[in-house]
Amino acid sequence: MPGDIPSSNDLAARIAAERLDDFDEELELELNDDGDDTFSRALNFLGHPPEDGPGLDRQVYFRELFRLQAELVKLQDWIVHEKLKVVVLFEGRDAAGKGGVIKRITQRLNPRVCRVVALPAPSARENSQWYFQRYVPHLPAAGEMVLFDRSWYNRAGVERVMGFCSEDEVQEFFRSVPEFERMLIRSGIVLIKYWFSITDDEQHLRFHMRNTDPIKQWKLSPMDLESRRRWEDYTRAKEEMLNRTHLPDSRWWVVEAVDKKRARLNCIHHLLSQFQYHEIDHPPVELPARVHNPDYVRHQVPPELFVPAKY
């Protein structure tokens, strides 16, 4: 049942899996899918859960992740070639895994083509503006993809639940957002909206992990703690938001996110499936010959300018 306290063995196993996932994040940065031998030796050294375990086999996960990331590079090139304007919204409860999938999407892409927007709380000046105004400057130009780590749907979620806006402002948001999104789409923007769904129990575990990990404690804010207390209020707000803003021309896609690795793969696979992209041919690059000038003299860098070699 939701809210039940898991057994000590179950909790220990889930904490171990969470820590393994943190370690895998570092492995993802180091490994490139440039050869089965290097890839296999690295994973065999680290070990992975048995095939009948609850988690996704790590070798399967990494192979699929690198394959999908290679496809994302092709999609990126196609977006630039076709001069597309793409907006992807990532919404969900705190600790639902939005940042994790965004990191995997952008990891091997050109930040000038694919950029992330994660706006802070609005300033006093922004609070006096048209609600959507502060999001508009971050919309893409031709050949760009923008990933919103939370978006204008803050009004229907955190702002509403935490009392940062009035109920009249919420209702005005629900009246305005369909037309705002239709304007974006009519302007040529491709709009994709994801909601990351986790259980009460899973969020509790992830908050516990953040609270006990010095490296991740910064992720646990007072707002996160209050969101735990108001779980049911967030649920009601989410249900109304999905009901009133899931429209034929700007629909929602729900990502089951209790299993982080599967959520990442499923979301990236689905994102790729939204485009009829193809690989763009690039002319071969030939490195020019190095020019050597007989009068060039390279001067020594003073030793005091170097960073001390501690390692």
Image (tube, helix red, strand yellow):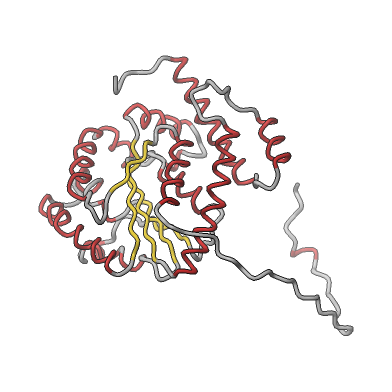
Q: Is residue 149 left or right of residue 33?
A: left
Corner quadrant of residue 151 = bottom left
The residue nearer to you, when weighing 174 against 311, is 174
Q: Is residue 278 above or below residue 210?
A: below
Q: Residue furthest right?
A: 294
The image position of residue 207, as x and y in percent, is 39, 33
38 in relation to 301, above or below: above
Taking depth in this image into account, of 203 and 216 the one nearest to the observer is: 203
Viewer-side residue, 64 vs 161: 64
Q: Residue at x 54, y 43 (%)?
A: 65
Q: Quadrant of the N terminus?
A: top left
In the image, farthest residue toward the left: 168
Where residue 181 appears, x then y in whole percent? 25, 61
Name the image quarter holding residue 64: top right
Count of all numbered marks drawn on residues in the image: 0
Can you give x and y, in whole percent of width and height, for residue 18 in the image? 50, 30
Q: What residue sits 33% from the left and 30% below the top?
A: 199
